[in-house]
Amino acid sequence: MVSERIARLFRHGRRMARTLLTVLVLAPLAASCYMPDDFLTEIRISKTGDYALVYKGKLVWVPLYKDIVTGALKDVTEVKEKEGAILRDLQRDDSFKKVQAVGRGTFDVFYERLGRFTGTSQVSFPRRGMEILRMEVRKNGVLYVVAATGAKPGAREELQALGLTPNGKIRIMTDATVIKTNAQNKSAGIPGYPGWVVYDWTVNGPNQPAPIVHIQMFPPTAATPEK
């Protein structure tokens, strides 16, 4: 599932920083108009702060999907125009290697991003303000990774009424010290990468708890630590 490009990120080790990494927090679905579907997500986070994020699957733009399936929007030309606008918006981000409209406000995408955390910073997918996945390093030196596998009350019922059920798999791999996680499965060992641990979740609906992993990445700053 991980490309050769991502694997190369961890072949060339840098000096290990004294980091404790807090990983992902998945934001409530109601915070985003996108819903993940039929997807595989893999994230690798190194003690050095290097990270690799891959998302392969579908993104559903819920407002457009709703208008189409409820009959509020019937004009084929207008549907195409709106899908085209969403497609162009996603393509502005070079990390989207593939974006294809497949109908009903749904897009088949392949997203790949490499980077390195240095101090407080945030990575949002697909973008800030519309996160279905967020990685955020705060002043306490903790990296919080959050993914939108669930939905708030009210939004859950709306999704179910529309026939939308997010489903997919999430995998997080790290060689840093994890201080909190609700992973469904945990396994040790990646061939060629001693010390790495694998955390897995299966997403099969909007009602399950959001996957979380917490790792301390940097020493806290002089500022008051954030919780």
Image (tube, rainbow, N blue to C red):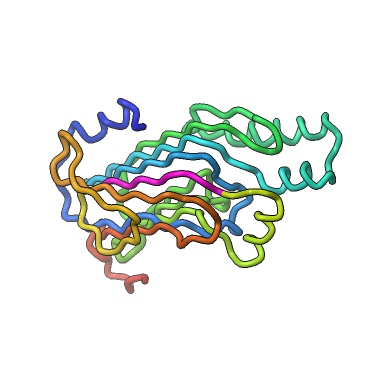
- Residue 178 quadrant: bottom left
Vertical side of 49 occupied by 94: above or below = above
Question: Which image quarter holds the C terminus?
Answer: bottom left
Vertical side of 11 occupied by 69: above or below = below
- Residue 99 quadrant: top right
- Residue 106 quadrant: top right
Identity of the residue furthest to the bottom in this view:
224
Expressed as whole percent of the image width and height from the top left, the position of residue 29 reads 57, 56
Expressed as whole percent of the image width and height from the top left, the position of residue 85 reads 70, 34
Left or right: 99 in relation to 111: right
Expressed as whole percent of the image width and height from the top left, the position of residue 138 reads 36, 61
**Residue at 36%, 70% in the rendered image:** 226
**Residue at 59%, 49% in the rendered image:** 165
Vertical side of 162 occupied by 52: above or below = above
Expressed as whole percent of the image width and height from the top left, the position of residue 90 reads 58, 36
**Residue at 30%, 25% in the rendered image:** 4
In the image, the segment drawn in magenta is 166-173
Q: Is residue 125 in the magenta section?
A: no
Question: Which image quarter holds the N terminus?
Answer: top left
